[in-house]
Amino acid sequence: MPSVLRYNRPATEAAQQAIAAALGAPGRDASEAFAAFIAELGLPRRLADVGVGEDRFELIGRNAMLSIFTRANPQPIREPGDVVKILKLAA
């Protein structure tokens, strides 16, 4: 999720300020605040922590293009490479 927030920041700045405030970190980057929240919960923080390696990113990117949710993303995702960018942020 922090990687998705980073990718979407240009299109969702105001909403992300509200997210950061709701996480008790007003003025902080929402992706960093959310990453800290995840860490506090002891949850996995990287895709590698749950067994997803970079060797799967291209396949995930292609499959993600089939989802209506990908096409509805606030920051446009036009090709599988855009999804791979997000996955690399989460690697």
Image (cartoon, rainbow, N blue to C red):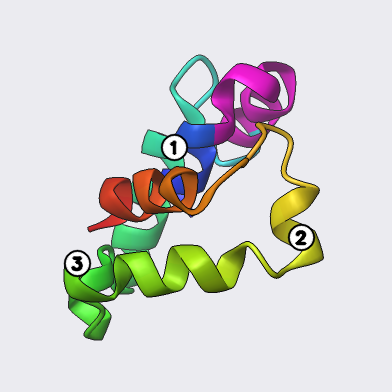
Mark 2 to mark 1 CA distance (whole Å) = 20 Å
Q: Is residue 47 left or right of residue 86?
A: left
Nearest to the observer: residue 64 or residue 52: 64
Residue hosting label 2: 69
What segment is highlighted magenta in the picture?
8-21
Residue hosting label 1: 31
**Measured from the top left, where is residue 80 in percent x and y?**
49, 54
Considering the whole magenta stretch, tell me its main secondary structure: helix
Q: Quick one: label 2 or label 3, which is nearer the N terminus?
A: 3
Marks 2 and 1 close (CB-CB < 8 Å): no
Quadrant into which the C terminus falls: bottom left
Residue hosting label 3: 54
Q: Is residue 82 left or right of residue 39?
A: right
Q: Residues within 10 Å of mark 1 (few under 14, many from 20)?
A: many
Q: Quick one: label 2 or label 1, which is nearer the N terminus?
A: 1
Between disc 2 and disc 1, the foreground one is 2
Q: Is residue 83 left or right of residue 89?
A: right
Query: Helix, strand, or loop for circle 2?
Result: helix
Q: Give the residue at x 74% y 35%.
A: 74
Residue 80 lies, with reference to residue 65, above or below; the image says above
Between disc 1 and disc 3, the foreground one is 3
Q: Quick one: label 1 or label 3, which is nearer the N terminus?
A: 1
Q: Is residue 74 left or right of residue 30?
A: right
Residue 23 lies, with reference to residue 14, above or below; the image says below
